Structure formats: structure tokens, C-alpha cells
Amino acid sequence: AGKYLGKVSDFSILLRPSTAGMFGLLPYRVKDVRIGGVKPTYRAGEGVQCKFSVVAEGGRPGDHVVRMEVYGPDGALVRHYSRNILALQGRAAATLPLALKERPGRWKIKLIDVTSKVSRNAEFLLKRGP
């Protein structure tokens, strides 16, 4: 569940029958996911440019998978804009291509490092298109 265990040689976990566990072993701790490039306001039909990086403590970040979740003005997840992105050496960029008839209002982009579950949000206001 995104719990940092620290520098350990082993750990114990209780798994119930028919359940699965996923564990990540990194030579550093993921401290943050930084987001840049998102402007405060866009018009429908524009592309939202988003740059991001995984911030590591105790080493340089390696390759990570970052989940980009996009939430509309009603707070609901917009699945067709959400996706996984490979961040080589902890860095990546993505474009969110907004439809011309997209709903105006306050939108949210949530970036989640898949291994550590460390996340960060960015918001923007979407206005009607041209």
C-alpha cells in the first residue's frame, strides 16, 4: 500500500489465500513527484503540456512508471485521458489533448509513482474553446 520500509534485508507480511502482493526494491527512497509546465488556464481543444520528475533521496532515480490520472470538473476520473507513462531516469513529459467540446471548469491531473505510491497534483481551469 505504498509503505516505505526503509533499508532492510528482509521483512514479514501476511498474505491471505487468493491475494497477491507487489513489492518494489529500490536503492533509494522516492521523496516526491514534481510537476511542471501546467499553465493555470487552457481553452477546450488545447493540449495540456506536463513535465514531471521523480525525486529520490539517497541516489539518482532509475526508470519509473508514473500513473497519470485526470479528473474532470465533477471530480470523477476521466479514464480516456488517464494512462501509465514510462519515466526514464525518473523524467518524462506528456500532453493531455483536450477535446473541443470538453466540459469547462477546474480539472486535476494526479501523478502517482507506481512503485512507491508517492503522488502530486496539478490543477488548471478549462474554458470553452474558440
Image (cartoon, grey):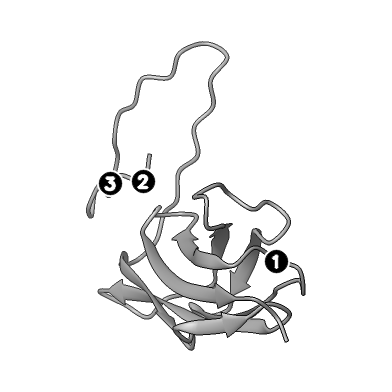
Q: Position of residue 13 (x, y in %)?
A: 34, 26
Q: Residues within 10 Å of mark 3 (few under 14, many from 20)?
A: few
Q: Nearer the viewer, mark 2 or mark 3?
A: 2
Residue name at image x 32 percent, y 74 percent: 56
* Element type at mark 3: loop
Residue underneath mark 2:
2
Q: Position of residue 39 (x, y in %)?
A: 48, 87
* Element type at mark 2: loop
* Element type at mark 1: loop
Residue underneath mark 3:
9
Q: Amino acid at mark 1?
A: Glu
Measure the C-alpha gap from mark 2 to mark 3.
Answer: 18 Å
Measure the C-alpha gap from mark 3 to mark 1.
Answer: 50 Å
Q: Position of residue 45 (x, y in %)?
A: 73, 80
Q: Residues within 10 Å of mark 1 (few under 14, many from 20)?
A: some
Q: Quadrant of residue 119?
A: bottom left
Residue 55 seen in the figure: yes
Residue name at image x 56 percent, y 74 percent: 126
Q: Is residue 39 left or right of residue 87?
A: left
Q: Amino acid at mark 3?
A: Ser
Q: Which mark is residue 102?
A: 1
Q: Is residue 47 left or right of residue 90?
A: right
Mark positioned earlier in the residue sequence (2 or 3): 2
Q: Amino acid at mark 2?
A: Gly
Quarter of the image that includes the N terminus: top left
